[in-house]
Amino acid sequence: MGSKTKRGYAIPEDKNPYGLSAEYIFPYNQAATLVTVAEKVHNAAVRTQVDLIRKMLGNPDDVSTLLSAWQKAAANLTQATDGNDDGNGLMTARASINARWNGTSKDAAVEYLDNLITVTPEQRAIIQNIASEINQFSALVTQNYATAIVHITNYAAIVAELAGGLLEEIREVLTLDGGSVETAILRALGEFMTETGKLLESVITYKNNLSGTMGNIITEAAGIAVPAALAPDATIIGGWQPRNPTGTPWGTDS
């Protein structure tokens, strides 16, 4: 294929700026071939479709970072409630306080912990829902992107073969052929638009549905009761009474 196949479609020096695996690298050369041939036969829509595919994946590192952040938040809330590696979670703290202390300050502290223990699993469930939706959307986009760039490669090969590999002279070839090559190329380009259009439509449809799903999650999250601050009574030293036989009340000399 001649160099003219690249003039009408920008090809960056770094074709893989995000360090993607081979199956996700955008096929710039094949895309240039496809766009060049399409515009030779006056089909401008192919360029738009190819650009949509190129932009579909965006920066996958951003999606991964976002997903990782939500997953980490869910994991941290799980640890806060059930205990982390050393077992010191909210439930452990509550049990420890009840085992070692009496008094009004202890009661205030335990009530606060009860509120946290009640609310935290609800928050965790919502955060897990958000992470799950992000993961599903990312998987759908990545899968359809991979299929779409395979279509670009395949249909570029088809139109190049139909044009006899003489893309820089395609107009003359079409004229000499009497139109049959052009008809075949247009048919191939039409199939490309149909197949890739289905992929793009599925992503757009899912994205629209995701907006509704995320709206429901946000509404649900807004209904979660956030515990008030720790009651001041819990900070009164004299209100913490050690259970016998651990000793005299805190703050006394005898």
Image: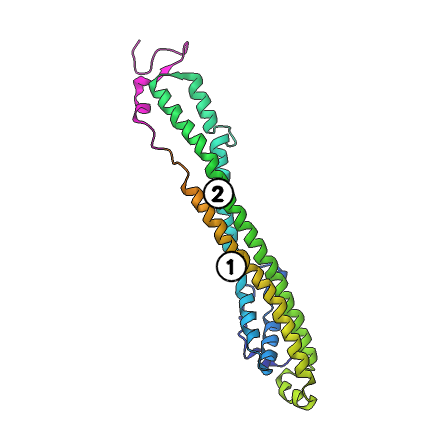
Residue 45 x, y percent position in the rendering:
55, 75
Residue 111 x, y percent position in the rendering:
39, 25
Name the mark on residue 59: 1
Q: Quadrant of the N terminus?
A: bottom right
Q: Is residue 61 above or below residue 107?
A: below
Q: Is residue 233 magenta?
A: yes
Left or right: 66, with 239 as reference point = right
Q: Which residue is mark 2?
A: 127
Over which residues does the magenta segment extend? 228-254
* Residue at 65 percent of width and 65 percent of height: 150
First-in-chain label (2 vs 1)? 1
Nearest the eye: 117 or 242: 117
Which residue type carries mark 2? Ile
* Residue at 60 percent of width and 78 percent of height: 38
Label 2 CA crowd tier, 10 Å (few <14, some 14–19, many 20+): many
- Callout 2: SS: helix
* Residue at 57 percent of width and 80 percent of height: 39
Which residue type carries mark 1? Asn
